[in-house]
Amino acid sequence: MTGPDEHLRRRRADVARRLAHITDDIAELRGDRGAESADDEHDPEGVTLSVEWSRLEGLRAAASTELDDIDAALGRRASGTYGVCLTCGRAIPVARLEVRPDATRCVDCATASGR
């Protein structure tokens, strides 16, 4: 089993790679949007460029938020507050942190807040 720091760093690297791929896909799509030959707006079977743009932007925003959450968790590790519920102040169970290393609330508080 790996420690929390290693787990967070590994997860951060994975998310950063995913974000880089999404950013590359967006750049490619941006080029396609300017090309007349890539116009698929009238293809009833295909996904329009606008729909694909929206999908990629949603994935980019989610990955960016996940990266921010991981960075915040690394900050809590550095400050010694990692694994402490922000709502009730109790320890967040290790099993929860193994599944969700960026968790900021214990299960009870997360359930109560709907997160």
Image: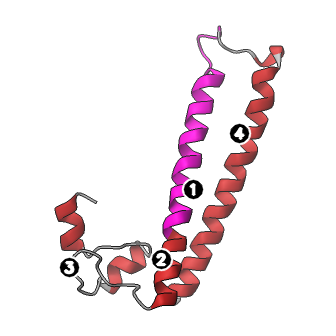
Q: Secondary structure at mark 4?
A: helix
The question of residue 50 being in magenta is answered with: yes
- Mark number displayed over residue 73: 2
The stretch in magenta equals: 42-69
- Mark number displayed over residue 26: 4
Q: Is residue 115 left or right of residue 80?
A: left
Q: In terms of sequence position, does the residue under pointer 2 or pointer 4 come before the other? A: 4
Q: Secondary structure at mark 2?
A: helix
Q: In terms of sequence position, does the residue under pointer 2 or pointer 3 come before the other? A: 2
Q: Secondary structure at mark 3?
A: loop
Above or below, 104 against 34 in this view is below
Q: Residue at x 57, y 72 (%)?
A: 11
Q: CA distance from mark 1 to mark 3?
A: 27 Å
Residue matched to label 3: 88
Residue matched to label 1: 64
Q: In terms of sequence position, does the residue under pointer 4 or pointer 1 come before the other? A: 4
Q: In terms of sequence position, does the residue under pointer 1 or pointer 3 come before the other? A: 1
Give the image location of residue 105, x and y in percent. 29, 73
Crowdedness near tag 4: few (<14), some (14–19) or many (≥20) residues, C-alpha within 10 Å: some
Crowdedness near tag 2: few (<14), some (14–19) or many (≥20) residues, C-alpha within 10 Å: many
Q: In terms of sequence position, does the residue under pointer 1 or pointer 2 come before the other? A: 1
Above or below, 44 against 89 in this view is above
In front: mark 2 or mark 4? Answer: 2
Give the image location of residue 30, x and y in percent. 75, 31
Q: Nearer the viewer, residue 85 or 7?
A: 85
* Magenta region, main secondary structure: helix
- Amino acid type at circle 2 is Ala
Q: Residue furthest front?
A: 79
